[in-house]
Image (cartoon, helix red, strand yellow):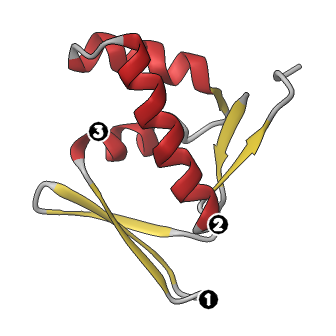
Amino acid sequence: MIVQRKNDWLFATVGEELVMMNAERGNYIGLSEVAARVWEMIEAPRAVDDVCAQLETEFDVAPETCRAEVAAFLNVMVEHGAVAIDPAPAA
């Protein structure tokens, strides 16, 4: 699966948190350190497996835990319209 950002979101770091806003929809999201790292990594479309592999090395997390947490986070981001997930691999 490939994940990519949608471009209609503004974001900035406030303290140790990344905050995101979609003015058109009136949505506001605050991201933790790890979630902000995922957002940073998907600046360009990227395979979810690659995101998880990178997080596993950076945050010392078990693969099963990482994949479950990333999937849950991405599902929330899809619901907010912040990311799109393409089930097909990138060509």
Local crowd size for mark 1, using a 10 Å CA cut-off: few (<14), some (14–19), many (≥20): few
| Three-letter residue code for mark 2 | Gly
Asked if disc 2 and disc 3 are in contact, CB closer than 8 Å, the reply is no
Front residue of this view, candidates 8 and 82: 82
Q: Report the Cα–Cα distance between label 2 and label 1.
A: 11 Å
Q: Secondary structure at mark 2?
A: loop
Residue highlighted by disc 3: 34
Residue highlighted by disc 1: 24
Name the mark nearer the viewer: 1 or 3.
3
| Three-letter residue code for mark 1 | Glu
Q: Position of residue 51 (x, y in %)?
A: 50, 24
Q: Position of residue 88 (x, y in %)?
A: 86, 27
Residue that appears at 66% across and 43% down: 4
Q: Position of residue 59 (x, y in %)?
A: 23, 20
Q: Quadrant of the C terminus?
A: top right
Q: Using the rendered view, name the quadrant where residue 40 is placed.
A: top left
Local crowd size for mark 3, using a 10 Å CA cut-off: few (<14), some (14–19), many (≥20): some
Residue that appears at 54% across and 38% down: 42
Q: Report the Cα–Cα distance between label 2 and label 3.
A: 19 Å
Give the mark, 2 or 1, whose residue is nearer the N terminus: 1
Q: Position of residue 81 (x, y in %)?
A: 64, 66
Q: Report the Cα–Cα distance between label 1 and label 3.
A: 26 Å
Residue that appears at 61% across and 88% down: 24
Q: Is residue 60 left or right of residue 31?
A: left
Asked if disc 1 and disc 3 are in contact, CB closer than 8 Å, the reply is no
